[in-house]
């Protein structure tokens, strides 16, 4: 159980907050590259860590991430004209380049020196893996990009989605490292979901609802082992990677299904972007898999048209079907693995009150992740923060049978390493 002060430290990420300063030390997945596709793209509003920003590509294809509001009269640059290597405010014509410099001020007298003093806040941005990443921290502390395995794969091998979640990032991320809920929240869908079915491990997940957790610190965050009984000689281990500041890699379901993971990125204190990805390290997606991914199966969702908001939401009780719940078609009556998760996470309130929690042994990973985040606040200026080194994110998760006498870190040591061109290990 956290104190209210600790809960506030962990959940508040806006400018000037302790956790906000920590998160700004890392590269942030901000938007799909296709959202600002092509030179002189339409400007797109984005909000991250409580800051309202505008994203665009200029006439030469360079990416600009600027304060959304013009320095003149604070009109939104969303309505601006993107032309001739700059974004021009639609109100009085002030124009800004991708670095935030005011390059034209047609409403002021010709030759004015005022323009030289005007500069909007601008953040570095790069495109990698089909995603636009931005860095919002101190310029002299900018780290290399993360090396999540899917970033380096061909587009045909990966599928990336994002959705808006109407809760604080922390309760969403904690769901991603909570392996015990799989035996309940998803137990009736593991065999029929096209991206999780057909694996030997599913029978262990459903048979043993009391996993024992063993958690150890890794270079990037935590290595989380959930141990279930398999047979007289072996345990079934699902081993999750959690990497600072917000990444999880889901233990795979067989080697024929794709590997998956998440990033939980604060929009503000009450909403977050839930990035989700699936990928094959050694093959392209087949037509059946793509149909499932694009249709919102697995960890992805179906959207309201023209948005990244799920159709299933609080106002419609996440399309809950009590009949399906009674028939054991889904544990909660909610369809889809993603919606089964975020419906419960959002039900906790937009910022969960952790002073009311009563945690058990199955919550060991959640407890230690909170401790690692809080500890990092004491060392926020360090160049050795967990997850800053790209190698910290270049790892895999796994699900394996191990002899009962073998420690999971030892038995899974090879399986959690990325070997380009080789498939992952899983049952």
Image (cartoon, grey):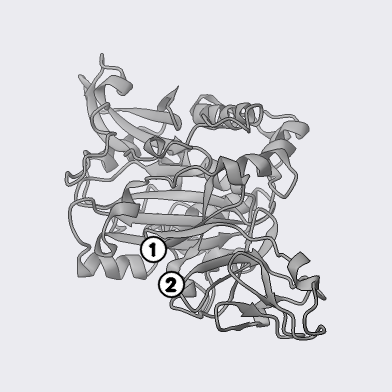
Q: CA distance from mark 1 to mark 2?
A: 8 Å
The residue at 67%/44% (across/down) is 20
Q: Is residue 69 left or right of residue 207?
A: right
Q: Quadrant of residue 225?
A: top left
Query: Nearer the N terminus, badge 1 or badge 2?
Result: 2
Disc 1 designates what residue? 130
- Find residue 248 and report its image quarter: top left
Which residue in the rendered view is the most extreme toward the front?
A: 111
Determine contact: label 1, label 2, CB under 8 Å: yes
Outermost residue, top side: 405
Residue to which mark 2 is pinned: 34
Residue 2 coordinates in the image, percent (x, y): 69, 29
Image mark count: 2
Sort mark 1 into few (<14), some (14-19) or many (20+) by Cα contacts within 10 Å. Answer: some
Along the line of sight, which residue is nearer the eye, 393 or 236? 393
Quadrant for the C terminus in the image: top left
Give the quadrant of the N terminus: top right
Q: Can you tell which quarter of the image residue 122 is in?
A: bottom right
Is 256 on the left or on the right of 79, as rendered?
left
Secondary element at image label 2: helix
Q: Residue at x 33, y 28 (%)?
A: 228
Q: Is residue 19 above or below residue 236?
A: below
In the rendered image, residue 363, in percent from the top left (x then y), is placed at 53, 30
In the structure shown, which secondary structural element does the residue marked by tag 1 occupy? loop
Q: Residues within 10 Å of mark 2 (few under 14, many from 20)?
A: few
Estimate the x, y position of residue 199 in percent, counting from the top left: 22, 46
**Residue at position x 31%, y 30% in the image:** 237
Decide if residue 34 is in sight here.
yes
Q: Residue at x 46, y 59 (%)?
A: 126
Residue 110: give x, y in percent of width and height: 78, 84
């Amino acid at each position: 159980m956290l104190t209210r002060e600790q809960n506030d430290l962990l959940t508040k990420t806006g400018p000037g907050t302790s956790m906000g300063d920590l998160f700004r030390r890392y590269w942030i997945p901000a938007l799909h590259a296709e959202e600002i596709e092509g030179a002189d793209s339409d400007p797109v509003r984005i909000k991250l860590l409580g800051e309202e920003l505008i994203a665009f590509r200029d006439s030469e294809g360079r990416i600009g991430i600027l304060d959304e509001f013009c320095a003149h009269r604070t009109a939104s640059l969303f309505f601006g004209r993107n032309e001739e290597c700059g974004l021009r405010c639609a109100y009085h014509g002030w124009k800004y380049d991708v670095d935030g410099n005011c390059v034209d001020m047609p409403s002021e007298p010709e030759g004015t020196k005022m323009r030289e003093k005007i500069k909007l806040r601008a953040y570095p941005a790069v495109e990698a893996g089909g995603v636009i990443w931005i860095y919002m921290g101190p310029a002299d502390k900018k780290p290399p990009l993360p090396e999540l395995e899917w970033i380096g794969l061909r587009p045909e091998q990966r599928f990336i989605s994002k959705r808006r979640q109407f809760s604080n990032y922390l309760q969403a991320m904690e769901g991603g490292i909570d392996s015990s809920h799989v035996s309940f929240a998803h137990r009736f869908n593991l065999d029929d979901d096209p991206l999780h079915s057909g694996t030997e491990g599913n029978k262990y997940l459903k048979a043993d609802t009391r996993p024992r957790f063993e958690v150890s610190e890794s270079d990037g965050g935590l290595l989380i082992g959930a141990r279930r009984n398999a047979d007289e000689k072996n345990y079934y281990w699902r081993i999750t990677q959690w990497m600072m500041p917000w990444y999880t890699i889901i233990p795979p379901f067989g080697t024929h299904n794709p590997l998956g993971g998440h990033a939980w990125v604060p929009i503000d204190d009450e909403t977050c972007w839930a990035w989700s990805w699936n990928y094959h390290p050694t093959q392209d997606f087949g037509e059946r898999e793509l149909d499932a991914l694009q249709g919102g199966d697995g960890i992805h969702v179906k959207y309201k048209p023209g948005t990244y908001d799920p159709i299933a939401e609080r106002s419609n009780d996440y399309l809950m079907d009590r009949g399906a719940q009674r028939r054991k078609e889904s544990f909660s009556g909610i369809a889809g693995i993603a919606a089964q998760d975020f419906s419960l996470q959002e039900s906790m309130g937009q910022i969960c009150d952790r002073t009311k929690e009563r945690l058990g042994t199955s919550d060991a990973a959640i407890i230690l992740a909170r401790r690692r985040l809080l500890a990092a606040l004491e060392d926020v200026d360090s160049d050795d923060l967990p997850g800053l080194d790209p190698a910290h994110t270049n790892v895999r998760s796994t699900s394996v049978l191990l002899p009962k006498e073998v420690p999971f870190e030892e038995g899974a040591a090879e399986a959690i390493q990325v070997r380009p061109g080789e498939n992952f290990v899983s049952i």
